Amino acid sequence: MGIRSLGYVRLNAPDIDAWKTFGEDFLGLMRIDGDNPDSLYFRMDHYPPRLVVSAAEESSLGALGFEVLNQRDLAEVVTAVEAEGIKVTAGSTEECAERRVTGFARFDDPAGNPVELFYGPVLDHVLINTPLVSRFVTGDMGMGHAIVSAEDVPSAFDFYSRVLGFVERNTAGPTYFMGCNPRHHSFGLAPTPGPGKLLHLMVEMASIDDVGRALDRAADLNIPMMNTLGKHTNDQMLSFYVYSPELYAIECGWEGIRVETEEPTYAITEGALWGHKFTPPPLPA
């Protein structure tokens, strides 16, 4: 029982046209048609769309989609979540079809972040085509990692570790980085006041040249930089950050370490070995 990976992320956005450019022309994802004409569907690999952006009046996190092994594991995790007094709702047949999964359940975590647990991705066997990126690093490590906010981080951490089975990999002050597979962290929690929200999403590319070309595309497309090219202290990833159309931090990285054997957790005092110089978000137009 437990979470295997971050399988997909769903976002709500007022300007999905901006995400067409961001997702295809910058990130290099493969956009495909989906069931909802008011949504954008982006593939990274042989899985169904890993990123879905839906039209909405306000920007928000639609869901973090975590994959479990099978129907039995889904039922076991749902039972554990319900034992915490959290309401869980099963996805309908139509919702499963739109997500291209066999089954899923949804709930809000203790911080208010929407979570979906799914199993059985429905594969269409259409060859992935990402001409701007040689390959995205997914497989047994899922689509990447996501960092969300929580007003009460210790409570949220207890839920994700004790109930969902995430392993604490390291801390950085009050921020927790947690893993569920060989990716150093698939999930993280950072303290901010108010309801939970998405802070940061990372995609890993297969080569340093992929990252360098993405850096060039960001400049060519006038995508605002958040953190310059740098190397992290915890997962050793070489990466840079930009602001997405909704001002989420999007990280493009390369060669993060794989954690094959669990080691004692540790605390870091610096986020980067070098680089990652911060730039504030652009002012509203």
Image: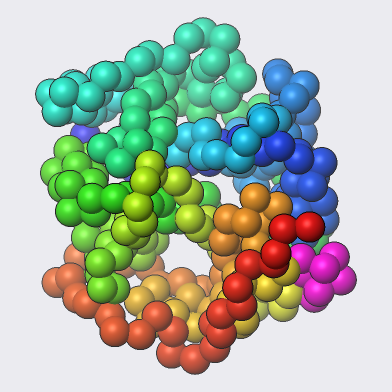
Query: Principal SS element in the magenta part?
Result: helix
- Is 41 included in the stretch rendered in magenta? no
The image position of residue 190, as x and y in percent, is 34, 59
As drawn, the residue found furthest toward the right would be 220
Magenta-drawn segment: 216-223
Q: Is residue 222 magenta?
A: yes
Determine the residue positioned at 43% across, 90% down: 273
Q: Is residue 122 left or right of residue 130?
A: left
In the displayed structure, 168 sits above or below 194; it is below
Task: Identify the residue at image location x=48%, y=55%.
Answer: 199
Tell which residue pokes out farthest to the bottom in this image: 274
Q: Position of residue 39 (x, y in %)?
A: 71, 29
Name the foreground residue: 18 vs 179: 18
Please determine whether, in this image, residue 224 is positioned above or below residue 84.
Answer: below
14 relative to 19, above or below: above
Classify the position of the N terminus by image quarter.
top left
Specify whether residue 53 is in view. no
Q: Which picture quadrant has residue 219?
A: bottom right
